[in-house]
Image (cartoon, helix red, strand yellow):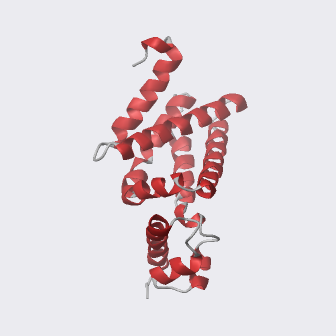
Amino acid sequence: MPRSREEVRRRLQQAALELYRERGYDQTTTAAIAAKAGVTERTFFRHFPDKREVLFDGEAALSAALISAVASAPHKLGPWDTLFFAFRSVEQLFVENRPFSEPRARVIASSPALQERELAKIGSLTATLASALRQRGVADRLATLAAQTGIATLSHAVTSWLDDGPSNLDDHLVQAFHDVRALSSSSPNRVR
């Protein structure tokens, strides 16, 4: 039997991921996840409200880290550079979760229900970032646009990093932010 609360959560997450990959999301039950993790179904529900949420557990930690990073960014930075600063400050969270994130992305891509949940989580994170930017004095419409564009840029960087094998996430983040700057400052056929 797992000893700590965190160990139970990790075992449930790993069990769910393995079962979703083997059987598919729709064919996997919370009872099967709990059994594979060596706990009861009741224990599963003490940790996660449903079988989708087991794949989205890190959102609260990421959101809190980003809010803190936006708040601590140098005041001279504009909204775009503030987001770049914040995303770079949370890179380690992505790096530490890479072994789980790669197969997780494939599971999510195979399930409309999980894709829907991911979109909701992205929307929540975008709203959180926009609010953090407004706290820095950024106008509402600019804070929203910066947060939406920033999350899309972060997502692009993380996806290309996961697809690129043992590369450095920071390289992909720098490149994605550079590409967005290039898109906004030159004609489309000059961007490479």
> 141 above or below 62?
above
Seen at 57% across and 32% down, the residue is 149
Vertical arrangement, residue 185 with respect to residue 143, above or below: above
Q: Quadrant of residue 161?
A: top left
Check the image and name the residue furthest to the right. 140
Residue at horizontal 45 percent and vertical 64 percent from the top: 21
Whether 16 is drawn above or below 130: the answer is: below
| Front one among 109 and 58 | 109
Q: Residue at x 54, y 37 (%)?
A: 152
Can you see residue 74? Answer: no
Residue 31 lies left or right of residue 92; in this view the side is right
What is the quadrant of the C terminus in the image?
top left
Answer whether residue 16 is visible to the viewer in this image.
yes
Instruction: Name the residue: 43% across, 84% down.
Output: 2
Viewer-side residue, 86 vs 33: 33
Place of residue 53 in the rendered image (x, y in percent of width and height, measured from the top left) = 59, 64
Measured from the top left, where is residue 171 in percent x and y?
34, 36
- Which residue in the rendered view is the most extreme toward the left? 166
Q: Residue furthest bottom?
A: 1
Tell me the quarter of the picture where residue 117 sits.
bottom right
Residue 139: give x, y in percent of width and height.
70, 29
